[in-house]
């Protein structure tokens, strides 16, 4: 028995409290363990469903049949004229790309990525533009810092570069020089596995045409970045000048290398400050992840704003460049956002029976419960017969597997989320 300060005994009332606490801890640990197992179970199902959607055929005849059955329209297929025109700049790529499109296994990856390939070809082909044509295009040196001072009251990028140290250099380098090149692939994988039907195609269009538009602007409206102002002031620029690594030269010094110095010296586009495609990438990634996996949107946009800062800290962009790049990303996202994709996360959540199933990292309700059936009732993974018809019946058994799994998991969730009476008594 315990004793109070006034000498009264407590009567052993502390024992039930310890019992309740112990029960609560055990229940919590068991619940966490089951939730973890369910997460991996659903992750496995999502990966299996994504793999099941793939067409592993290597027969070009299937692609030819699909081409014959395709309903061509100016609105939907005019984009291919742009791609064909730009792809003429790289003949060796045309051969590989045509082969990849003919094979069903590779075409399902290369076709959605066509806008991205078009942008890459145009970017690297820029160095082959004749000097006679380039010399007619004026390079804007002072317009960006002037705009920044007028719009924001100060040269923000200049302020951010006045204090540097190795720790900030590394912090800026990670998003600008590493994650910028890795995250587009990570986002694509997540969208393919968890995003639902059509998500990866939407991503390919938005990313590809955003960058394609940005490169066209950089070619016809070339603007000098902040590092040029630091090195040359406001003296007129010309195309005989080589690019500079700016603040990334300090990263070369830290790692005792010349990687960034050499890369920027040989850059196809030297005066491509406006718009900032680094900002465009980060903004578009944050938009896609927030749309399909909204629970962690704070982290997506935190990364985006850190990257915005890094572009100015490393003297590669002005703030006005970031605003333009972000606006380009937002415009591209909503331009290619279809009605199906606009409502897909809500549809997935309602089918899965959870308010935020996608945000929790679980697989799409449509992909998990209905297998490979699209929002509009069509089947995205089909078996084309000799007449090109679709046979969704072959996926019936596989779809029922996921439906049974989901029902079983929801029953388990109901049991796991039940609060024991002993814990309720604590309230």
Image (spheres, grey):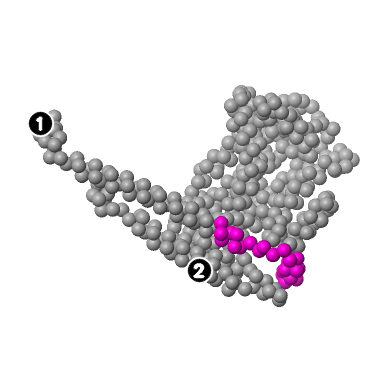
- Disc 2 or disc 1, which is closer to the eye? 2
Is any part of residue 7 visible from this angle? yes
Residue 107 % position (x, y): 71, 60
Report the side of 159 relative to 124 (left or right): left
The outermost residue toward the left is: 7
- Residue at 77% in and 39% down: 269
- Residue at 75% in and 69% down: 61
Asked if the magenta segment contains residue 336, the reply would be no
Is 357 situated above or below 275? Answer: below
Residue 124 % position (x, y): 78, 44
Which residue is more in the foreground, 89 or 410?
A: 410
- Residue at 69% in and 28% down: 252
Image mark for residue 7: 1
Disc 2 is placed on an element classified as helix
Asked if the magenta segment contains residue 71, the reply would be yes
Q: What kind of secondary structure does the magenta stretch mostly adopt?
A: helix
In the image, the segment drawn in magenta is 47-74
The outermost residue toward the right is: 132
Pick the quarter of the image with the N terminus.
top left
Report the side of 219 relative to 162 (left or right): right
Disc 1 is placed on an element classified as loop
Neighbours of disc 2 within 10 Å: few (<14), some (14-19), many (20+): some
Query: Image quarter for residue 177?
Result: top right
Is 371 situated above or below 293? Answer: below
Query: Image quarter for residue 374?
Result: bottom right
Residue holding disc 2: 400
Which residue is more in the foreground, 126 or 162?
A: 126
First in sequence: mark 2 or mark 1? Answer: 1
Report the side of 419 relative to 320 (left or right): left
- Residue at 62% in and 65% down: 380
Residue 125 % position (x, y): 81, 45
Neighbours of disc 1 within 10 Å: few (<14), some (14-19), many (20+): few
């Amino acid at each position: 028995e315990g004793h109070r300060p006034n000498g009264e005994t407590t009567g052993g009332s502390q024992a039930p409290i310890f019992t309740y606490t112990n029960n609560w801890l055990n229940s919590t640990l068991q619940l966490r363990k089951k939730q973890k197992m369910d997460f991996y179970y659903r992750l496995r199902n999502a990966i299996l469903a994504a793999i099941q959607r793939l067409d592993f055929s290597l027969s070009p005849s299937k692609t030819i049949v699909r081409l014959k059955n395709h309903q061509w329209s100016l609105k939907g297929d005019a984009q291919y004229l742009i791609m064909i025109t730009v792809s003429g700049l790289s003949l060796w790529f045309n051969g590989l790309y045509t082969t990849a499109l003919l094979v069903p296994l590779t075409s399902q990856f290369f076709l959605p990525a066509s806008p991205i390939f078009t942008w890459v070809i145009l970017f690297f082909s820029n160095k082959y533009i004749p000097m006679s044509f380039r010399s007619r295009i004026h390079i804007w040196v002072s317009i960006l810092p002037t705009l920044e001072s007028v719009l924001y009251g100060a040269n923000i990028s200049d302020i951010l570069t006045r204090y540097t140290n190795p720790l900030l250099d590394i912090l800026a380098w990670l998003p600008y020089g590493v994650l910028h090149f890795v995250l587009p692939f990570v986002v694509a994988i997540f969208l393919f596995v968890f995003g639902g039907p059509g998500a990866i195609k939407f991503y390919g269009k938005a990313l590809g045409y955003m960058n394609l538009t940005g490169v066209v602007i950089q070619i016809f409206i070339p603007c000098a970045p902040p590092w040029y102002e630091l090195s040359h002031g406001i003296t007129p620029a010309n195309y005989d000048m080589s690019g500079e690594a700016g603040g990334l030269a300090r990263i070369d010094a830290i790692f005792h290398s010349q990687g960034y110095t050499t890369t920027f010296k040989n850059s196809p586009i030297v005066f491509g400050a406006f718009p900032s495609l680094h900002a465009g990438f980060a903004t578009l990634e944050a938009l896609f992840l927030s749309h399909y996996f909204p629970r962690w949107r704070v982290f997506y946009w935190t990364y985006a704003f850190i990257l915005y800062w890094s572009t100015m800290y490393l003297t590669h962009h002005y703030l006005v460049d970031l605003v333009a790049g972000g606006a380009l990303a937002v415009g591209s996202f909503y331009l290619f956002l279809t009605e199906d994709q606009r409502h897909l996360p809500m549809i997935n959540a309602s089918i899965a029976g959870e308010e935020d199933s996608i945000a929790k990292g679980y697989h799409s309700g449509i992909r998990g419960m209905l297998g490979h059936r699209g929002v509009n009732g069509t089947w995205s993974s089909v078996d084309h017969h000799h007449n090109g018809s679709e046979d969704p019946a072959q996926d019936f058994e596989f779809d029922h597997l996921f439906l049974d799994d989901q029902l079983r998991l929801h029953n388990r969730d109901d049991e796991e989320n039940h609060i024991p009476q002993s814990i309720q008594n604590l309230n």
